[in-house]
Image: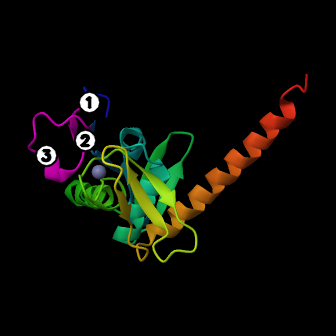
Amino acid sequence: MENKKQTVNIGLSNADDPFYRYKMPVLLTCSQGKGNGIKTIINIAEIAPHLNRDPEEILKYMSYTIGASSKIDKDNNAYSINGEHNNATLILILDDYITKFLQCYKCGNPETFYEFKQKHNMPLRLRCKACRHISKIDPCEKLVTFILKNLQRENLETFILKNLQQQETPST
Ligand SMILES: [Zn+2]
């Protein structure tokens, strides 16, 4: 995985566009172990920052889609799925993720961020930085629950941090 890094356009629908400005590293896989202990390591840690998404979220999507459990080795920053999985299959699954959870449903731009609408039947949305369109994500997607939990945790952390900063600010 250390040779000169090859990049591809984000989203298979943009694969043939030589001028596309959003790029990510090519998805690479490597199988490790034997028999029942075999697992496929995927370079999600390298790809995720280019998508501006949590690597664990991408791993979860792959693991839900394949129906195999996943593992994160934090010491080695290695993300893996149990079993042996074909590189092409994983590229297609990653593209599914990109279509559903990253690209704007209107203009296709990959610069989006999540928004959460409480008490709504489609609570998770994507806000596009380019056209401002709000894409509503299908709540039946298993990953939605995982993302919402993460968002709530982030909100809580921001809230706690803000309170701490206020307490630390000198009053004079
Ligand atoms: Zn858009």
- What secondary structure is found at the residue carrying circle 2? loop
Instruction: Give, as a three-letter code, the residue at label 3.
Output: Ala
Residue that numbered label 3 is attached to: 15
Q: Which residue occupies the foreground of this view, 133 or 98?
A: 133
Q: Amino acid at mark 1?
A: Lys
The percent coordinates of residue 111 (x first, y second) are 35, 44
Secondary structure under the numbered disc 1 in the rendered image:
loop
Quarter of the figure with residue 142: bottom left
Q: CA distance from mark 2 to mark 3?
A: 12 Å
Of callouts 1 and 3, the N-terminal one: 1
Q: What segment carries the magenta color?
A: 5-22
Q: Find the distance from the CA under tag 1 to the CA under tag 3.
A: 17 Å
Query: Left of 59 or right of it: where is 133?
Result: left
Q: Mark 2 or mark 3, which is nearer to you?
A: 3
Q: Is residue 18 magenta?
A: yes
Residue located 30% across and 53% down the image: 103
Residue name at image x 35 percent, y 62 percent: 135
Q: Decide if ligand 1 comes within 8 Å of the CB at mark 2.
A: no
Name the kind of residue labelled 2 in the image.
Answer: Val
Spatial separation of the CA atoms under disc 1 and disc 2: 8 Å
Q: Which residue is mark 2?
A: 26
Q: Is mark 3 within 8 Å of ligand 1?
A: no
The image quadrant that residue 35 belongs to is bottom left
Question: Which label sits on residue 95?
Answer: none
Crowding around mark 1 (Cα neighbors within 10 Å: few <14, some 14 to 19, many 20+) is few
Percent across and percent down for residue 167 are 86, 36
Q: Is residue 65 above or below residue 85?
A: below
**Cβ–Cβ under 8 Å for marks 1 and 2:** yes
Mark on residue 5? 1
